[in-house]
C-alpha cells in the first residue's frame, strides 16, 4: 500500500491540472502562434511560467485505484499488476482466470 500522503499529493495535482487546463492551453496557443508579435508571445511564456508547476499535465503519474502503487500500472484496468492478480485469483474480475499449465 502506498503512503497516503503520496496518493493525496497526486489527487491535488489532478485537481490543479483540471483547474488550469483552459488557461494553460490558451497561453500555450498564444506562445506558439508565429503570426503574433514577439513581445506578446514572450509575455504569454512568462504568464505560463507563473502558473503552478503542478498544474502541468506532465507532472501527473498514474496510480493504482486500489493500492496507490505508482509502478506496473495497467491503463485499461486502472490498477497495478499486483492488485490485478489478487482480484483475479479471488474471481472478482469477470472472464479472467489465473493461468496454470
Image (cartoon, helix red, strand yellow):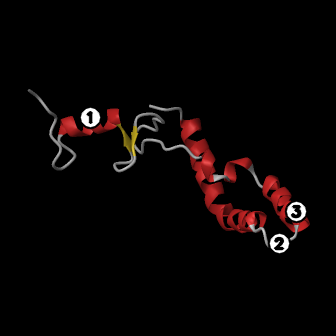
Q: Which mark is residue 85?
A: 1
2 displayed left or right of 99: right
Residue 6 on image: x %, y %: 57, 37
Q: Earlier in the sequence, mark 2 or mark 3?
A: 2
Gap between marks 3 and 1, in whole Å? 51 Å
Q: Find numbered disc 3 in the image and state the secondary structure of the residue it sits on.
A: helix
Residue farthest along the top direction in this orientation:
101
Q: Viewer-proximal residue, 60 or 65?
A: 60
Label 3 or label 1, whichever lies nearer to me, is 3
Residue highlighted by disc 3: 43
Residue highlighted by disc 2: 36
Gap between marks 1 and 2, in whole Å? 54 Å
Classed neighbour count for the residue bearing mark 2: other residues with Cα under 10 Å, few (<14), some (14–19), many (≥20): few
Position of 37 relative to 46 (above/below): below
Residue depicted at 42% across the width and 45% down the height: 65
Image quarter of the N terminus: top left
Q: Find numbered disc 2 in the image and state the secondary structure of the residue it sits on.
A: loop
Label 2 or label 3, whichever lies nearer to me, is 2
Residue depicted at 54% across the width and 36% down the height: 4
Residue depicted at 75% across the width and 51% down the height: 52
29 displayed left or right of 44: left
Classed neighbour count for the residue bearing mark 3: other residues with Cα under 10 Å, few (<14), some (14–19), many (≥20): some
Position of 69 relative to 8 (above/below): above
Q: Viewer-proximal residue, 51 or 35?
A: 35
Gap between marks 2 and 3, in whole Å? 11 Å
22 displayed left or right of 49: left
Label 1 or label 2, whichever lies nearer to me, is 2
Q: Which mark is residue 6?
A: none
Residue depicted at 45% across the width and 35% down the height: 69
Position of 34 relative to 100 (above/below): below
Residue 15 on image: x %, y %: 61, 56
Residue farthest along the left direction in this orientation:
101
Amino acid at each position: 500500500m502506498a503512503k497516503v500522503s503520496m496518493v493525496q499529493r497526486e489527487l491535488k495535482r489532478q485537481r490543479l491540472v483540471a483547474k488550469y487546463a483552459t488557461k494553460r492551453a490558451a497561453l500555450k496557443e498564444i506562445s506558439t502562434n508565429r503570426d503574433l508579435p514577439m513581445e506578446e508571445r514572450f509575455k504569454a511564456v512568462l504568464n505560463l511560467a507563473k502558473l503552478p508547476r503542478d498544474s502541468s499535465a506532465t507532472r501527473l503519474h498514474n496510480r493504482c485505484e486500489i493500492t496507490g502503487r505508482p509502478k506496473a500500472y495497467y491503463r485499461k484496468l486502472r490498477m497495478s499488476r499486483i492488485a490485478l492478480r489478487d482480484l483475479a485469483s479471488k474471481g472478482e474480475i469477470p472472464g479472467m482466470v489465473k493461468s496454470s499449465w
